[in-house]
Amino acid sequence: MKAVQYSSFGGPDVLQLADVPDPSPGRGDVVVQVAATALNRLDVVQRNGWYTLPGYSLPHISGMDVAGIVVEVGTAVDDVHVGDRVVVDPSLSEVADGSKLAGHGDLYGDLGVIGGTVAGGYAERCLAPASHVHRVPDGMDLVAAAVFPTAWLTAWHGLIEMGQLEPGETVMIHAAGAGVSIAALQIAKWRGAKVVATAGSDEKCIRALAMGADAVCNNRAEDVAAFARSFTSGTGVDMVFDHVGTALFGPSLFAIRPRGRLVNCGNTSGDTATIPSLGYLFHSGISIIGSDPYRYHEFADAWRVYGELSPPVVVDTEYALADAAEAHRRMEAGDFFGKLLLRV
């Protein structure tokens, strides 16, 4: 089969279209003919060698978000069939014996991730445990399924499981044009919360308003803490959902009401952060919550809501598999809104 892989760290040019062996299923596995796979920031930072997941090795085939059609099933698989349209849960927690991908379920150690530590969706075919594929409804396009896994599960776990977002609360969501932020906005509105979205350009702010944000703020031109307090009549937001990290960490704390919380699930602007005032932090009783890996059961829960909600699918650009390097360049440039997608 054709796949895009890389054997050394470097810029987008290390991504090479190559012929590699087709995956073969273990007793508890399926092989998916990939229709589409969405890019994620991890694809870029691992390719550059800036950060790699425990258990990662070279050569590597990226692509954590996989949707396609089952073309082969293992001998012990009886609830998934050839021809099924599926989306893949990339986290390899709770994979049963009989799968070739079993034994990588340590949530706080060597957690296996399809496209992160084992071969993923930048390929014509992808191996997955049968327990980790979910049927795509007949009325849903496979592209809509491909943008779901990483963005929605990251946002779902951060907002619902870790942040305990309640109806009527106000959440500030940074980097509104990013896939995980769009998912967070959709989930927060489904939950009945108000959303203050921030973005790095007026254009992205306008688009966030069109998607349902209650208020928007250009985080490169305005004081996000002052904006949050203005929107909440001086109180502050109940929660900040942050995957930006360094650049907005301090202002985010001052945007939060007493006994509110900051949920962090990423570090796209850097891996260090400064708490500008410990006095404000403890006096206001603010919680800083790290959003750890999502649990196996959450994927089905979030997938059910996604299907019922049928939110707009926000794809900035689609690329052919052979153009993966160009897609990576677009992601590194940062000038996009929504997901970047490879059509396989």
Image: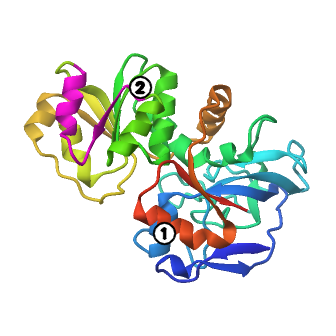
Give how far apart the Cα atoms at labels 1 and 2 are: 35 Å
Whether 189 is drawn above or below 9: the answer is: above
Q: Amino acid at mark 2?
A: Leu
Given residues 106 and 70, the one toward you in this image is: 70
Given residues 76 and 288, the one toward you in this image is: 288
Which of disc 2 and disc 1 is earlier in sequence? 2
Which residue in the protein does label 2 denote? 165
Residue span colored magenta: 213-232
Q: Are marks 1 and 2 in contact (CB under 8 Å)?
A: no
Label count reads 2
Whether 30 is drawn above or below 43: the answer is: above
- How crowded is the residue under tag 2: few (<14 C-alpha within 10 Å), some, or many (20+)? many
Left or right of residue 63, residue 215 in this image:
left
Residue 291 placement: quadrant: top left
Question: What residue do we see at 65% from left, 47% from top?
Answer: 94
Q: Position of residue 35 (x, y in %)?
A: 75, 56
Dot label at residue 329: 1
Circle 2: element type: loop
Question: What residue do we see at 87% from left, 57% from top?
Answer: 71
Question: What residue do we see at 83% from left, 67% from top?
Answer: 24
Q: Position of residue 272 (x, y in %)?
A: 25, 58
Q: Amino acid at mark 1?
A: Arg
Left or right of residue 49, residue 323 in this image:
right
Single out the mark in the foreground, 1 or 2.
1
